[in-house]
Amino acid sequence: MSSTASPGSVTAGSITALRGDPHHLGHSRDGHGESRATGRGIGGPAPKRIVVAYGFWIFILSDIVMFASFFAAYAVLQGGIADGPTGPEIFDLTNTALETGLLLLSSFACGMASLALGARRMLYFQVAMAVTFLLGAGFVALEVMEFADLVGRGLIPSRSAFLSSFFTLVGCHGLHVTIGLLWLLTMMAQVLTKGFRADIVRRTLCFALFWHALDIVWVGVFSIVYLMGSIT
Amino acid sequence: MSHADHAGPDALDRHQTDLAPGEEYGEEDIGKGVRGYLIGLALAVLLTLCSFAIVHTKVVWAPAVPVAILVFAVAQMGVHLVFFLHITTGPDNTNNVMALAFGVLFVVLVVGGSVWIMANMNANMMPGMPHSAMPNSATPHQPMTQPMHH
């Protein structure tokens, strides 16, 4: 035991053999030779940038699964109005169109911030993030006004099954956007004070994923809740 | 391609390595990146306008309107995935696409299954029983008091 444990007995070649590719999963693209790419073959583990973003991608997909169950609940309970108002009676499509435009432009501005982040341009990054924040905050403000108007008319979630599922689905999306706004401010501050450090850049890219994913969920919300709910 | 210029003999082909979700190949070219986001924005605006325009139009056969809205929504989600989240069919994106495919499968099962089952249940309700999920139900306040003995 002690005779084989000397450090000199482990050569670089045996390490390569140990970390090799016994099942030949990591062929390079042309089919011969082992891939030196990371995350497969003999290239070693994937870089942290990919591991972190992939893990966050899994979280986003699980979040979308949660939204799917709220969508399912809304689709099923939509008709349960309990003699209360129906969708076409309470939806204001002008407001919905404004919200959609604000969130879409916010997603675009977030993309510009990602590009500025990749190019390590501080001023462009901060301006693009500030624009993203203002557009997102405008979206939240419009939604809060819409909800306040409904509640002021006595149309609270407990009024009917339709309103319960409506407030749950749309409110949950609005809550996500609100939390995203707080995260956005955090990333602006962290990039400003700590610079384009690798861990800060990873967090900011995760935020960009989150923000774009929320816009995808909103496409489902305005299409299924507001537009399909307004067909008379 | 710009990446071929600075790829030394030891540099890995970028297509061999994986891309993180949201990461775009060739992101170092800012002009190309902005152009991609602009194309995505234009397509998304176009699809959104189509969705909003079709709601109150008389041009389209009425039963086709919800289907059209769904098609526009799915198309716009695709546009967002490709141009904003940079999910592509490339080999460096396989892991991201497989995770997304599982998510889509789950969403389709949950939403489609719920709607199917509840529509079937409502359709098979006996007359006089409360149609809990039917619009403009005639008997919304009548609770289901009769237990299902025998």
Image (cartoon, grey):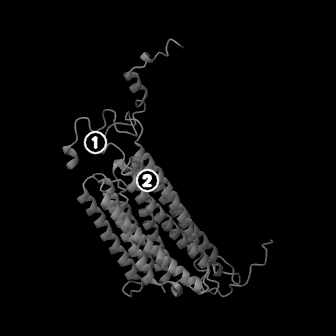
Residue placed at 41% from the left, 68% from the top? A133
Count of numbered badges drawn on the protein:
2
Q: Quadrant of the N terminus of chain A?
A: top right
SS at mark 1?
Answer: loop
Q: In the image, is B11 to the left or to the right of A101?
A: left
Mark 1: few/some/many CA within 10 Å (<14, 14-19, 20+): some
In the image, farthest residue toward the right: B149
SS at mark 2?
Answer: helix
Dividing the picture into quadrants, the one containing residue B83 is: bottom left
Q: Nearer the viewer, residue A146 or B18?
A: A146
Where A42 falls versus B4 (above or below)? above
Q: Which residue is mark 1?
A: B13
Q: Position of residue B103 (x, y in %)?
A: 49, 58
In the image, farthest residue toward the top: A3
Dividing the picture into quadrants, the one containing residue B39 is: bottom left
Mark closer to the observer (2, 1): 2
Q: Nearer the viewer, residue B138 or A14?
A: A14
The answer to the question of whether label 2 and label 1 lie on touching residues, with beta carbons closer than 8 A, is no
Q: Position of residue B36 (x, y in %)?
A: 28, 62
Where A80 falls versus A209 (above or below)? below
Where B43 falls versus B53 (above or below)? above
Dividing the picture into quadrants, the one containing residue A11 is: top left
Tell me the kind of residue under disc 1. Asp
For marks 2 and 1, give the CA distance.
26 Å
Tell me the kind of residue under disc 2. Arg
Q: Which residue is mark 2?
A: A203
